[in-house]
Amino acid sequence: MAYSEKVMDHFANPRNVGEIENADGIGEVGNSKCGDIMKMYIKVENSVITDVKFKTFGCGAAIATSSMATEMIKGKSINDALKLTNKAVMEALDGLPPVKVHCSVLAEQAIKAAISDYYKKQGIDPEPIVGVIPECDHCH
Amino acid sequence: MRNIYADNSATTKISPEVLEKMMPYLTEVYGNPSSLYSVGGKAKEALETARENIAKNLGAKSANEIFFTSGGSESDNWAVKGVAHALKASGKKHIVTSKFEHHAILHTCAALEKEGFEVTYLDVYENGLVRVEDVENAIREDTALVTIMYANNEIGTIQPISEIGAVCKKKGVLFHTDAVQATGYVKINVAEQNIDLLSMTAHKIHGPKGCGLLYIRRGVKIQNLIDGGAQERNRRAGTENVAGIVGLDVALQIAIDTMEQRNAKLTKMRDRLIDGLLKIERSRINGDRIHRLPGNVNMCFEGIEGESLLLRLDLKGVQASSGSACTSGSLDPSHVLLAIGLPHEIAHGSLRLSFSDENTEEDIDYILEIVPEIVSYLRSMSPLWEDIKKKEAQEVMK
């Protein structure tokens, strides 16, 4: 199993690591049993994600996909951020080994979870907009 | 940048002396040992000299008890399946093993279960040691074989092999041990330790890959592994890996000759490293500290995941592993760490460093310098660590 240079770059120098104080939305997905937890913080102004930070417990691919996903939604509208797919994250990283595809799924879900939280804080039901975020199911 | 190879339990660098002794059998002495002419005869002579010397070094009664194979996994498969199948006709359908054996044993046992055999998987407890009384209690009327590894490949714990051998002898049950990791670090004498079958490989002791052996005590009923020519006394056909076998013999001889001073040096390095790494908060050493291979360090650091730790170590020039190399393609945490009772989230954060004579005290200094930095960096970005610290703070408040 080998990672692409882009994955290694985002793993070795992850972008947007940290927390946002008074974040407008916080999403956490995955669980420690599986070995991956991603937590994403977003700052939203006029429906635009002005800042995003993450914290991740997980493998190299989990850290790299978190980093890449935050880069891809920073400065984007919420609507555009919701369109981000795990496939797009993977492509941006020049691919992932098959056993690590689930990490990119987690990254997509972490963004959706943070946006859901944002809507909830606004008093808006996120489900019609964001959909249901499934439980992590890659390990049992 | 420094380059430190600290994954000697995965494999080792071939030693120049071993390679030098192997070379003639890859070049001028290329004959088939089964041929009659002189270049074949010379190969045969090398083969049988190696067999005799190895038999002596293992305490075997006869060179005829040494069967060369392609390595540890083959030997393990042969020992377990070969004995099980041979004894099936006499009604023996039960095998005793432990929960933290190498997959070459565990998956072999699982395959036999599908055929209708029954397998008892013994607990290894928190210290990573099999208890002799558990072995004794598990043996039944229909037990064909007990197979317990000599030393564990992930946490390096050395099992009470002589005691288990004595129990098996008393109960009249065959005893196999996978000595792949223990070879060169413990004194092995198959006759004195009542070992009926023993697996060994060359590449863990600075020998070549693709060559190992199965010791089979004379009189043990076992199925042939490969039918074909008359090699290995008809039991494992195929032209012998002459150069590899010569390499195995030389590597084993060197390992035995240097064992005492090597073990002393490695034990000192190992203990200094463990003590140093234990200073990291919420870290733990996995497996018994005393009954342990001299070159094995296996630690867990809460709140971080093993692979990211390994990748960061690699970026700093240290090659290590998070468990065994054989399972790195899998997402599941180590079965060994789960067997010693660690919860999943802690088992995910393990680091195995395994040393050989090539490593130095300077290597230990460097590792002691960079591991705490890496652990602390990964924890700073870990939501799991954040939760652990929050819980800690709540405990203090109470």
Image (spheres, coloured by chain):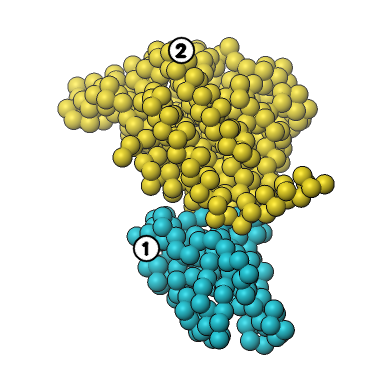
Chain colours: A cyan, B yellow
Secondary structure of the residue carrying tag 1 is helix
Closer to the camera, A35 or A121?
Answer: A121
Q: Position of residue B84 (x, y in %)?
A: 62, 36
The residue where tag 2 is placed is B260
Disc 1 marks a residue whose amino acid type is Lys
Whether B167 is drawn above or below B108: the answer is above
Q: Residue at x 69, y 46 (%)?
A: B343
Disc 2 marks a residue whose amino acid type is Glu
Whether residue B234 sits left or right of residue B291 in the image: it is: left
Whether residue A70 is visible here, answered yes or no, is yes
The answer to which quarter of the image holds residue B384 is bottom right
Whether B55 is drawn above or below A46: the answer is above
Few, some or many residues within 10 Å of mark 2 (<14, 14–19, 20+): some
Whether B136 is drawn above or below B283: the answer is above
Q: Residue at x 67, y 18 (%)?
A: B163
Closer to the camera, B273 or B116?
Answer: B273
